[in-house]
Image (cartoon, grey):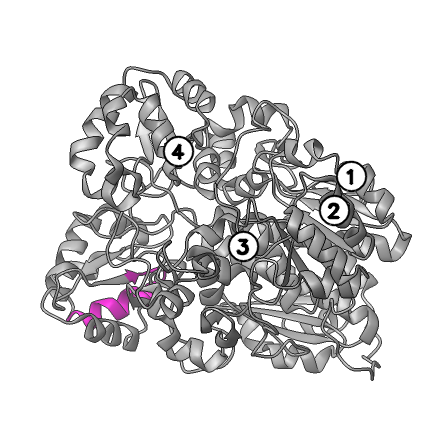
Amino acid sequence: MPTLVEAPDLVRWADAIVWSPGSELAASMSPARLRELNPAALVLSITPFGLAGPWVGRPATEFTLQAISGGVFARGTPSRPPVCVGGRTGEWLSGMIGAVGLLASYLRRLGTAQGELLDLSMLESIVLTHTMYEVNYLSIAGVPPYTRRLLNFPGIERAKDGWVAFMVVTGQQWLDFCVMVERADWLDDESLIRLEQRISRRDELAPVIADWMTRHTTDEVIEIAEALRVPVAPVGNGALTPRFDHVAANGLMTTNPRGGFGQPDHPYRFPRGGPQLRDFAPAPTLGEHTAKARATCSPREPARGTGRAALPFETLRVCDLAAFWAGPIVGYVLALLGADVIKVESVSRPDGMRMRGARSFREDLWWETGPSYHGGNAGKRGITLDLGSAEGRELLLELVSHSDILVENFTPRVMTSWGLTYDVLKAARPDLIYARLPAFGSDGPWRDRSGYAQTIEAVSGIAWMTGYPDAPPQFANSVGDPLAGSHATIAIFLALEHRRRTAEGSLIEAPMLGGALNICAEQYAEFSAYGALLERDGNRSPTAAPQGLYLCADSGGDTWVAVSVETEPQWHGLRKALGEPSGWDCLNSRDQRRARHDAIDGTINAWTSGRRAAEVEDLLVGHGVPAAVVGNGALLDSNPQLQARGFFEELAGHKVVGSATHSGYPILFSGGPHPPVHRRTPPLLGEHNHEILGGLLGHSDAQLAAWEAAGVIGTRPKPG
């Protein structure tokens, strides 16, 4: 291994350097020092809170970051403590966002020859991926999206031989579900159309659903649900998921080249040419390549670029056909990095996120108030096209001829039914990069299933690792969508570099399931290699003990503090904060503490129960213990660290909601964008029809009026 003396020589030859605190080498080589040694390098810093602000150096773990983010606040049942997402998903997604940032900076450096510092906050990564624009929701609706814990209902239910997951969102899906469980009488109860009413009557409805489920196998339930178009999926885990027929048929798993165990394959593919993805190389053994690195490393030329550090993608145009969250977040990132992103909807089927409005359906323009729509579509322009009409398809092809990238996340049959295949799109723009994000991919037995983040989380095993061991698995209700979007964005960057080198376009397929399998790789590897089935354990962790949520004395009786002890210094800090509880001095290893976890929890609970949460947090953090009050995500804009970094920003001038608070991006780029990062408010439905169809494509006002009269374009949703 390189020594501290040799490290500067190795740093000088690097194109990119990934830095995080925690080691002796990292302590001796700060990001600022790395920039001095190699000004031409891209230096990515990954820290819990970023490199500046009042919380720099504050002790934290993934668990306490999830607590701060608000992602824990509403997950679970009121009778038990809230519960985190299992499987260290925050670390995975922080790494993904870091990769997106590095590739964007690399593409910018091609034109500037300048290095850059990328300052990534894991807290901001978790806010962006484990919660769904809750600050934005409060700023538009005037109330937070959640005021208490709740479980999806119906959600994950036990069948005769396993667990089955449902995502019943719309009124029609609930009606179809009623038919499935043979309760025609529920069809006439209009109050049950609303999820809130179903949850409030859970004690009445759940036993009936459970009785029907336990009389059917998982295969039978899924077959009936699919026939009725109820979103459904089996619940997988380290043992089951690799054996699902769709996973096997699509080659979504591969073999580790060194260990021989099963692991996920690449989460995206280029089925028609494009970049060549390398086979996985064996993970290096300790110091395996030290001698080669010493022999072959040579310093990089110093950065000589003098040109303006332009936003990485300000010369690109993106045709964004995506809806909901996984697809739109791709355009969200490209827009804040400079691209002209044109969102394409139709008046007969606007983006479904518009339907989650913050105002009554009786108010005019209610569809322009959906906070989840606003959150994922800042920075874009918007048009409408009826792609079911010949005129709408011709206009789309005209737009494609002026675009570099097209993104969509329909089921595979949709674009084909319109005749908008890759070959047709490529004829309009030969070097087009076409990224599609179907839930399950374009091949295999599940190709036509509709997919939500929740059903993807179920199949992959994310849900399996979330919840208490004596209760059903739980949805994360978040990470499946932004995970898929991050993988697709990385694939787009690879395709852009391929196009730069070859002048060729690419077809990208980044199914949501592929991304979710990758975040669950540890589950499959453990079972394949050792026969060990990883299981949910509430808020506990194999890497920390004690770890949990502890009730405090605040009014209301539902305020919790997250505590997570991963190291021996943190354990000694906890002991001191609690006044050296009896018997704790002999618990000198994590395994010993895990064996006594219940007793330790009892002592901590007794201590927190007489103190307010803020006092508990301050005392523990002051002793070097990772601790955090479980926060409401809608109130995060008052967090001092996020304020210092400018993560939330006000976007004014929206023609319906006025001013609203939006999330930024978890990376501060030294070359920009600098906060505020958003350049325009989310588009109204069809807001830029004249600007784009007239100005960019050159059609006359008279022609646009004729298309509007025919329903090809428009600015108001069609009834029904």
Can residue 159 be seen here?
yes
* Residue contact between numbered discs 2 and 4, judged by CB atoms under 8 Å: no
Q: What residue is shown at x 28% (from left), y 28% (from top)? A: 187
Which residue has dot 1 on it? 422
Q: Which residue is mark 4?
A: 173
Identified by mark 1, the residue type is Tyr
In which quadrant will I find the N terminus?
Answer: bottom right
Identify the amino acid type marked 3.
Answer: Arg
Residue 450, above or below 654: above
Counting the numbered discs, the total is 4
Q: CA distance from mark 1 to mark 2?
A: 7 Å
Mark 3 is surrounded, within 10 Å at the Cα level, by few (under 14), some (14 to 19) or many (20 or more) other residues, namely some
Report the span colored magenta. Answer: 563-579
**Residue 307: in magenta span:** no
- The image shows residue 690 at horizontal and vertical percentages of 70, 63
Earlier sequence position, callout 1 versus callout 3? 1
Describe the element under mark 1 as helix, strand or loop.
helix
- Nearest the eye: 96 or 573: 96
Asked whether the beta carbons under mark 1 and mark 2 sit within 8 Å of each other, the answer is: yes
Front position among marks 2 and 4: 4
* Residue at mark 1 to residue at mark 3: CA–CA distance: 30 Å
Q: Which residue is mark 2?
A: 434
Q: Nearer the viewer, mark 3 or mark 2?
A: 3
Q: CA distance from mark 3 to mark 2?
A: 28 Å
Q: Label 1 vs label 4: CA separation? A: 32 Å
Q: Is residue 55 visible?
A: no
Could you classify mark 4 by the number of other residues whose Cα lies within 10 Å: few (under 14), some (14-19), or many (20 or more)? some
Rendering quarter of residue 448:
top right
Residue 360 lies in what quarter of the image?
bottom left
> Which callout, 4 or 3, points to the residue nearer the camera?
3
Reading the chain from its start, which is encountered first: label 2 or label 4? 4
